[in-house]
Image: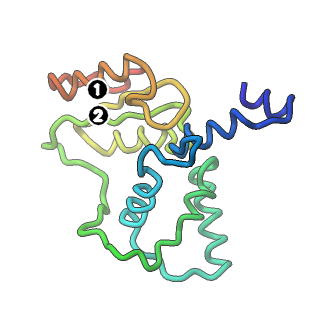
């Protein structure tokens, strides 16, 4: 509908709505519904160790690597390199995403059509954790819980409420 409106009629009201309220959480009067954009900057700057100033050539090389890793959003993540001067630093950094065999049950959730975090990343993460169970949403979009269907919500709620761990590879 939004693309039809844009391409056929030449108006972008629905696209603007999707970008503003749907993505940025900004209402028609310019107020934001939450601070998720600021939180994303804070999380990104704390997740990534401070980078030295890059030359243009170094930045372009980093941008290419980012786009190879994430064809849809790599350019955007590369553009967010600018954490120079961020006044806080992480108290600890995570170097290893694997888990030991004595870790409790872990559910890794991935979406087959996630443009930001490909399903292969969820599969790889689950493989590195001996106690992990992979839960797959067959669908589109970023973030499965609360954004998809009752199968995902029920499975995750059962894990948190009752401790029920789904069979690895369960698909919703």
Judged left or right of residue 167, residue 71 is: right
Looking at the image, which residue is at 38% across and 30% down? 145
Judged left or right of residue 43, residue 27 is: right
Residue 133 lies, with reference to residue 48, above or below; the image says above
- Mark 1–mark 2 distance (CA, rounded to whole Å): 8 Å
Looking at the image, which residue is at 47% across and 78% down? 84
Residue 171 lies, with reference to residue 119, above or below; the image says above
Q: Circle 2 — which element? A: strand
* Image quarter of the C terminus: top left
Instruction: Place residue 40 in its image quadrant.
Output: bottom left
Disc 2 residue crowd, few under 14, some 14–19, many 20+, Cα 10 Å: many
Q: Nearer the viewer, residue 121 or 36?
A: 36
Looking at the image, which residue is at 50% across and 24% down? 138
Mark 1 touching mark 2, by CB under 8 A? yes
Q: How is the image coloured?
A: rainbow
Spot occupied by residue 104 in the image (x, y as percentages of width and height): 15, 38
Q: Nearer the viewer, residue 151 or 70?
A: 151
Residue 50 lies, with reference to residue 137, above or below; the image says below
Spot occupied by residue 117 in the image (x, y as percentages of width and height): 49, 44
Q: Nearer the viewer, residue 76 or 166?
A: 76
Residue 81 lies, with reference to residue 3, above or below; the image says below
Q: Which residue is mark 1?
A: 156
Q: Earlier in the sequence, mark 1 or mark 2?
A: 2
Looking at the image, which residue is at 52% across and 72% down? 82
Q: Which residue is mark 2?
A: 107
Spot occupied by residue 167 in the image (x, y as percentages of width and height): 29, 22
The image's mark for residue 18 is: none
* Image quarter of the N terminus: top right
Spot occupied by residue 169 in the image (x, y as percentages of width and height): 37, 25
Q: Circle 1 — which element? A: helix
């Amino acid at each position: 509908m939004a693309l039809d409106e844009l391409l056929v009629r030449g108006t972008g009201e629905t696209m603007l709505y999707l970008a503003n309220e749907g993505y940025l959480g900004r209402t028609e009067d310019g107020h934001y519904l939450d601070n998720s954009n600021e939180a994303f900057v804070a999380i990104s700057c704390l997740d990534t160790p401070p980078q030295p100033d890059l030359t243009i050539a170094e930045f372009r090389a980093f941008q290419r690597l980012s786009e190879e890793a994430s064809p849809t959003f790599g350019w955007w993540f590369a553009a967010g390199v600018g954490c120079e001067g961020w006044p806080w630093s992480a108290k600890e950094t995570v170097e290893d995403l694997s888990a030991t065999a004595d870790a409790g049950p872990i559910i890794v959730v991935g979406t087959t059509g996630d443009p930001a975090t490909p399903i292969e990343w969820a599969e790889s993460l689950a493989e590195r954790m001996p106690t992990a169970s992979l839960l797959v949403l067959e669908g589109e979009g970023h973030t499965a819980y609360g954004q998809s269907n009752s199968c995902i919500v029920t499975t995750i709620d059962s894990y948190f409420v009752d401790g029920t761990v789904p069979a690895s590879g369960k698909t919703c």
